[in-house]
Amino acid sequence: VTPGDAAAAGRALRAVLLRATEGLELAAVEIAAAGERDGTAARGTLSAEGEMAALLRLAERLVEPAAGVRVERVTLGPVGGASSTGTLRLVLEGTSLESGS
């Protein structure tokens, strides 16, 4: 990512979030990311539904240092409230690590 290129920073973070979902049994995956004004980093959100094991593996992939993501907030809860069928929803918010971080 070229310093100062906010669009490129956003695209790079979206790609990282998408790669983290590969091979996992997930549903209702939503990814949003946008570069920060100075273009050195991006902020993004990933949400997905699935079984506990798949969602935990997804979170593990993103907290690995090689992912280049600083996870800021994670929420995990049942889909459908009290009448839930065991499917959970994970929402993860984070930022890309700036070069040299």
Image (cartoon, rainbow, N blue to C red):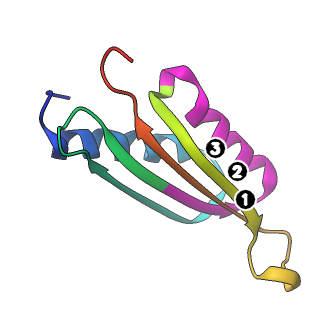
Label 3 sits on a secondary structure element that is helix
Alpha carbon distance from label 1 to label 3: 12 Å
Residue 20 in the image: x percent, y percent? 53, 41
**Magenta span:** 46-66
For the residues carrying marks 1 and 3, which lies nearer the camera in this image? 1
Give the residue displayed 39% in from the left and 28% down from the top.
97
Query: In the rendered image, which quarter is residue 58 located in?
Result: top right
Q: How many marks?
A: 3
Q: Which residue is mark 3?
A: 58
Pointer 1 or 3: first along the chain:
3
Compare marks 2 and 1 and give the one earlier in the sequence: 2
Q: Is residue 22 visible?
A: no
Q: Is residue 52 magenta?
A: yes
Amino acid bearing label 2: Leu
Residue 6's tag is none
- Horizontally, residue 13 falls left or right of residue 76, namely left
Judged left or right of residue 24, residue 9 is: left
User: Which residue is under mark 1?
Assistant: 76
x 86%, y 85%: residue: 83
Residue 9 in percent (x, y) is at 24, 39
Q: Which residue is mark 2?
A: 55
Query: Identity of the amino acid at label 1?
Result: Leu
Mark 3 closeness class: few <14, some 14–19, many ≥20 residues within 10 Å:
many
- Quadrant occupied by the C terminus: top left
Residue 12 x, y percent position in the rendering: 30, 38
Q: Residue at x 49, y 28 (%)?
A: 67
Q: Main secondary structure of the magenta part?
A: helix
Query: Is mark 2 in CB contact (under 8 Å) with mark 3?
Result: yes
60 w.r.t. 86: above or below: above
| Residues tagged 2 and 1 counted as in contact (Cβ below 8 A) | yes
Query: Which of the image's four quarters has the N terminus?
Result: top left
